[in-house]
Image: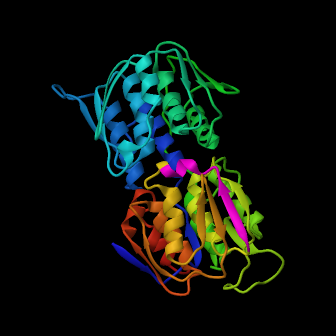
Amino acid sequence: MNKKITRFPSGTVKIPPSKSILHRAVICAALAGVEVKLSPVSDDIDATVRCVNALTTEPQEGEGELQLDCGESGSTLRFLIPIAAALGKSAVFTGRGRLMSRPLEPFLDELRRHGAVIEQEPDAINVSGALRAGRYELPGDISSQFVTGLLFALPLLRGDSEIHLTSPLESAAYVDLTVEELEKSGIEITRDGADFAVRGNQEFAAREVAAEGDYSQAAFFLAAAALGRDVRCEGLNPDSTQGDAAILQILQDAGFEIELASTVRVLPRGGQISRRNRTVLPVEIDVSGIPDLVPPVAALLSVADGTSRLYNAGRLRLKESDRLEAVAAELNAIGADIEIDDDALIIYGRKSLDGGTVNARGDHRIAMMAAVAAIRSDAPVTVIGAECVSKSYPNFWKDFEVSAK
């Protein structure tokens, strides 16, 4: 689907539930023996619901290996592989897009070292065997999802275990969310620096599946507000521990004030400034812990009054697209001036963008980035493959174009 962006948000937008929290809450509920039933939320959450329900439901007589389609959800795949091994289930994990080529080593090797039998094929991962308790060692700079997957699985084992990180943990806030959700389900996790201690034979307590608003999705609307759209975000927790709540500080550093009430609103600092000509200050940001904020922030900074730098962004190359290259190339295609320097984006701000065509590359955040960039474009922006927003936010285009909600 091609989408020509001609309307922009105005009024109050109810931000959908946090995808990161929902993944975790769904898994905790299923491990407590609850069959999770949710109305369709997004492709990624639907994949987790479908797969974890299959893993935790008693098999029918004569049923063979479980066939688990993870769609394009890295969280689903990385969280559920160790759970399948902990439960002693035989399962075949599949996926689409770039999912099966995204990095899984040395995660799978460490699972094999503890009893899991894992055979990796180009388009599938076969899991069997039974995971054993013990000491697990993993680097922390490849994916925090490896740690989260183990934190779900290890409480199910007979003995006690520990996780030792051999390098600093990037995206640590996502692991903090995992620990929070586990604690809500009665699971005890002890953390000491780079180590996690996990007692075995724990039972998950049944609980409601719920989540606060998603800051990674709200960031697109908050960036739109910074660019002059009269839009407010509803459903966000001002005290959230979501890592992507950092968007509030980023906007303040870029010269804006944040009004936190029943809604979150972005205002220009120091008096009234016309919508079209609000000044965005350049910033330098270490994005190693907040990779999902790079697309909306890059769109915002492409019209900043100066040069910005988003650095430690190398892991963006391993997303649904090579997101580091895609952000630069697709914003440049509509008139931005961005270059890649190793693992950093150097963004030379312009007064406005030209407009034109953006290829979403099957990446939901690139499509949403284009919507923000279109606000300061002199001609309309058309997004090729705009339907990919269904991965995380199926109603994005409706919310982005509806006024006075």
The residue lying furthest to the right in this view is 270
| Image quadrant assignment for residue 392 | bottom left
- Residue 128 image offset from top left, x and y in percent: 31, 23
Is any part of residue 37 visible from this angle? no
Residue occupying the point 32% across, 45% down:
95
Residue occupying the point 43% across, 24% down:
109
Looking at the rendered image, the quarter that the N terminus falls into is bottom left
The answer to whether 88 is drawn above or below residue 403 in the figure is above
The residue lying furthest to the left in this view is 62
Residue occupying the point 41% across, 41% down:
76
Looking at the rendered image, the quarter that the C terminus falls into is bottom right
| Image quadrant assignment for residue 345 | bottom right
The answer to whether 276 is drawn above or below residue 262 in the figure is below
Query: Does the magenta portion include 152?
Result: no
The answer to whether 75 is drawn above or below residue 300 in the figure is above
Q: How many marks?
A: 0
Q: Nearer the viewer, residue 140 or 4?
A: 140
The residue lying furthest to the top in this view is 159
Q: Nearer the viewer, residue 319 or 22?
A: 319
Which region shows up in magenta? Answer: 306-317
Residue occupying the point 29% across, 37% down:
124
- Residue 219 image offset from top left, x and y in percent: 60, 63
- Residue 246 image offset from top left, x and y in percent: 68, 55
Is any part of residue 79 visible from this angle? yes
- Residue 161 image offset from top left, x and y in percent: 55, 17
Q: Nearer the viewer, residue 395 or 203?
A: 395
Q: Is residue 22 left or right of residue 222?
A: left
